[in-house]
Every structure is written in structure tokens, then in C-alpha cells.
Amino acid sequence: MPLENLKGRVAFIFEEDDFDVDQIVGVKNIKIQDVDELAALAMSSYDPGFAKSVKPGDVIVGGHNFGYGHPHYPPMKALRHLGITGVIAESFSPGYWRGEISMGFPQASCPGIRGLVERWDDVEIDWNAGVIRNLTKGTELPFEPLAKADALMLEAGGLVPYLKQTPAS
Amino acid sequence: MGYTITEKILARAAGLPAVKAGDEVMAKPDYVLAYDFPGYTDVYFKQMKEEFGIDKVAEPERFGIFIDHMVPVATPKEEELHQGTRAWCAENGVELFERRGIGHQVAAEVGYATPGAFVVHFDGHISQLGTFGTLGIGMRRNVLEAFVREKVSIKVPHTVRVNLHGELQKGVMARDVFHHMVRVLGPASCRFQVLELGGPGIETLTTEGIQSITCLAMFTGAVTAIVNPDKERLDYALPRARKKLEPVYSDADAEYAAVHDIDLSDLEPIVVVPPTPANTRNLSEYLGLDVQTGYLGSCASGRLEDMEIAARILEGRQVKTGFMLHVIPTSQEIMAEAARRGYVSTLVEAGAFVSSSSCDYCFGRIATMTEGQRAVSTGTLNVKGRMGSPDSEIYLCNAATVAASAIEGQIADPRKYL
């Protein structure tokens, strides 16, 4: 099944480079397993009203080397639980990238994205055309094509279904 | 155009005559390594059976499992995890290395650092096998692929070449070279690429020192680090190697994404201040800062040269009253040699707490810091909460700096003790 285009609002922009995603839920909460509890904590230090204002389909925008440090899985689990469907960043840290792609969570590396969008703009990730569109402003930027295996993994919905569906060599 | 060592290793592993950076290939790892950790190995073992219907891994001799975290255990649940791991290894005929030390170091000692081999793990610090011309890649959860299939999908990475020149000054150690690279090249400089170290300066470093540097490669964004192995590295690795492979080397006309030069003789000791491995500063800027605890160990540091310099600094001196100095050799082999050479007794007599090898100090499972405490540490990472409370702080530095700071109870310059 081809990857569906993502359409939603920019729910938040992390301006800083080398962003440590653990900050999303706070390091002291990183061991919490319960996703409702995590989601209630997510983004509270950035925008206490985040959980209320986010809508299913929204995306997050990040800077360069997004996911640097020692990324854990709970922050993005929490964001997905709130309805976030993907992350667009200037660039990604490889460990974070691999981890989230293996969860089937779409990511797009798009140099210039911070200049393309403002918070709450409507955006579209068009996988086929390889562009991010700012639907609010009528502008667009190309993003870096996904590796074949990454695209297949996202289409399959994560690592395990990918390994089940694709031939072994 | 020639090929990099990485391209050559992956070409062989993929069964292809040649591959170039950017190619997407299926490559067969020579070895698949992992340490047991909840949410990782226990999940792979379960998924193998339940999701893929695989009772046993194919070619168990390609696999190696380490028990190095939660050693010794503190709860029955942790012991249950280890029991599960032991049982899986026994059922699968996979070799288990328990209580031998930190797996990434033990892997080199027991021959997984085969020059020319392709090795996968979930943990990125396996990059340190690159010291011996082995391509070690941390795949995070995707390492499951290697448990259920012969080959893993990999995009052949581009390579950034860093040529080292000159020689380190007294009190400056190999891990300072790595932190300096993060400072001058940047924490994203090698994203998705291989950090290849070379140049005449590399021969002035010890094997242990190179292991320190290659271990930390991920903090430049690199997927791994590698060295074209010289005689000294081959003399260590070849007699231990688990399989016979021809070592490979980058061609003189190999294509690099970037080439950088670093003069080792320029460097001062470095301190990496919280809360990110990107915050590299000269030690001189932080002298005098109060610290309550020190950690000398980890897969990055904690080897004989680290023990030796700490023992030299602490010989005939005492750790400041109230300061907690933890010294944990990277492996039991290193521990035994450090004892034979007298480093252990010197350190103990100076007031250090010396423990058998374990990963647990590095991530705050034990010797856990509380709010407001500060550590000088040779661990891998200084993010918030890594060694305890999110409101404690970690200052990463070399082993000599940890030892000097232990004497003064504040961040201290080791050079005056050497």
C-alpha cells in the first residue's frame, strides 16, 4: 500500500538544533509506560495547552539534527497518542530516525522547513511528489527522498510488519 | 575512483563485487551482537517465536550475547531477565558472555573485532570495533532483522575522513580528541556517515585510546567509526579473530564526503558540560567547580591507560573526604591486569571505590546521583538524568581529570599532578 500523504497543522516548531526529544515528556518521566499518563505530560513545559489544542493529523516541525543525544521511545509514543502523525525537520539524528521509522512513524527531512512554515499553518507531506506544501501560504519545498527500506517500513506500518511482508533478500 | 574500507566491507557482506556510498543493499552480518536489556533482547526473543515462528536462529555461531547491564542484579525481576537470556542462549546454541565486562570491550577481547567483518548490534557504541577495521553498526530496534533473517537492509554510508597529526600533550587523552572533533566539526558533521580516522597522528595513540574515540562516534551523528588497521591493531585482533577474513583498507583515491585535519598537539583537556554531548569546553574554563562524585569507567574509558594515569595521579594522595570516586574497569580482563600492575591497590588506598566491571554506573542504575549533585565522569553521555536525578549534572572528561578532581573535590587540572 503506497504511503498516504499526511495533511495537518503544524502543532509545534522546535526551533533549536540538536533537539533532545526526551525533553518532550521531561527526563524525569521517561520511564513511565502508561501512554495516557505520558500524553498528559507531553509538551507541558513548552505549551501547557498543547494536548487540548492538538488535533489528529497534526505534525511537528524540528531543526537540524533532530533527536540528538540518547533518544527514548516514550516521547513520540505520547505525541502519537495525542494525534501527531509525523515529524518534519531540517535534518535528523540517525539513531532517532531509525528508531521512529521502525515504529512506523513518518519523518521527513526537509532543509528549509523552519522558513517554510509557521505554527498552525496547514501542511501536506506529499510522498510521491517529494515535497512539503504549506497549504496556508501556497508554498512548497522538496524533502530528501526516503531510502527504499525506510519507505517500505513506513508503508508496512513498522519494522515487524515490514519484515513479514518483504522478501528476505 | 577507489573504495572506502566501509564500501569494501559491505560489498563482501552483500555478496557483490563492489558497492558505492548511497547504494541500498542487503548485507549479511558476520556477527550479530546484543546485551540483554528489557524491551530489547527479551522482545526480540519473543518476536522471533511469536511473530516469525522461528524457534532457533540460523548459524548460532554468528551470534553473541552479553550480560553486562544489571550486573549484579538488584531485583528478582532483573534476575528473571538474565535467566531468560541464559535459557535463550542455551536453546539457540548462542555463546553468552556473562560478567566478563562491558560487551563492546569484551567483543574485542573474544574476537568479534575481526578486521574486515560487518557487525550489527542495537547499541551504537559497538562502533568501537572500528578500531580494528571492523564495521560495527548500531541498528536500534532494526537489529531484529538480523535475528529473523540472514541479511539486513542497509544504505551504504558515505564517509567523512579525519586525519590526525602530531601527538597529544601530557594530561590530554584520546577521548579529548573525540570531544574536540565534536567541537570543531559539529554534532551533526557526520550524520548518517562513517567517521574514518587516519593520518600519522593515529599511530601515536594506543589501541585503548582509539577505542575511546570510535566508541563515541554517534555524537558526531556518525553511524559508526572505523580505522584502517595498522600492524599494532592487527597484532591484537587477528590472533583473536573468530573467522578468517582478509583485512581491507580504503584506497588512496577513495571518495570521501569531507576530509578534515586535526592537530593533536594543539589540544587541551576538555570538559563536556551538561546537558548535551555537544557542549565541549576547555577544562580551564571550569576549574574550581564543586563536584561530589567521580566515575572512571564505561565502554568509552576505563581501560588500562585510564587506570594507570588515575593511579599515577592518586599515588600517595587521597580522595577528598566526602568525595565519592567510583572506578570500574571496562572488563574483567582489564581488572585483573590492573590488579597485577598494582593500579587497583593504589586506587583503593587513595580512597577510591573499585568495583568489578558493569555498565550500571554509566546510566545511574547504581551510584545514583540525587538532585543538586555533580559528577565528573568518563561515561558516554551527559544528558539530563543519565546518572540519576534530572536535576543532577554530569561533566564528561578524561580519566586524569576525574582523578585530579577527586583529590580536590572540584574540577581540577590533572597536569599539575603528572
Image (cartoon, coloured by chain):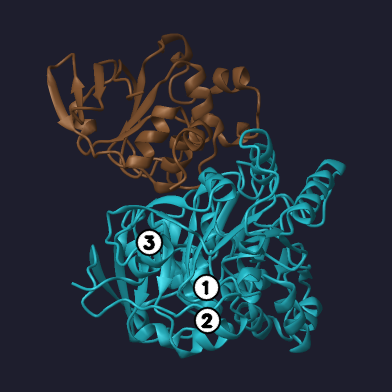
> Element under label 2?
helix
Spatial distance from mark 3 to mark 2, Cα to Cα? 21 Å
Chain drawn brown in the picture:
A
| Chain rendered cyan | B
Q: Residue furthest left?
A: A138
Find the distance from the CA under tag 1 to the CA under tag 3.
Answer: 16 Å
Answer left or right for B142 relative to A84.
right
Query: Residue at (43%, 88%) from the top-left corner?
Result: B204
Residue A4 shown left or right of residue B62 in the figure? left
Name the image quarter holding the N terminus of chain B.
bottom left
| Mark 2 vs 1: CB contact within 8 A | yes
| Label 1 secondary element | helix
Q: Which of B95 and A115 lies nearest the eye of the viewer?
A: B95
Q: Amino acid at mark 1?
A: Gln
Q: Name which of mark 1 and mark 3 comes first in the sequence.
A: 3
The answer to whether A160 is drawn above or below residue B127 in the figure is: above
Q: Which percent across, then down, holds residue A83?
A: 45, 16
Query: Is residue A78 shown above or below A49?
Result: below
Q: Which residue is mark 2?
A: B207
* Badge 3: chain ID: B
Q: Nearer the viewer, mark 3 or mark 2?
A: 2
Which SS class for mark 3?
helix
Q: Residue B303: where, in percent of width, then height?
A: 63, 76
The numbered disc on residue B211 is 1
Q: Residue B389 lies in what quarter of the image?
A: top right
Disc 2 versus disc 1: distance between alpha carbons?
6 Å
- Circle 3 crowding by C-alpha within 10 Å: few under 14, some 14–19, many from 20: many
Query: Which residue lies at the image location 51% right of the left edge and 34% below the top edge?
Result: A164
- Label 3 vs 2, first from the N-terminus: 3
Which residue does the numbered mark 3 point to in the structure image? B182
Read off the chain for label 1.
B
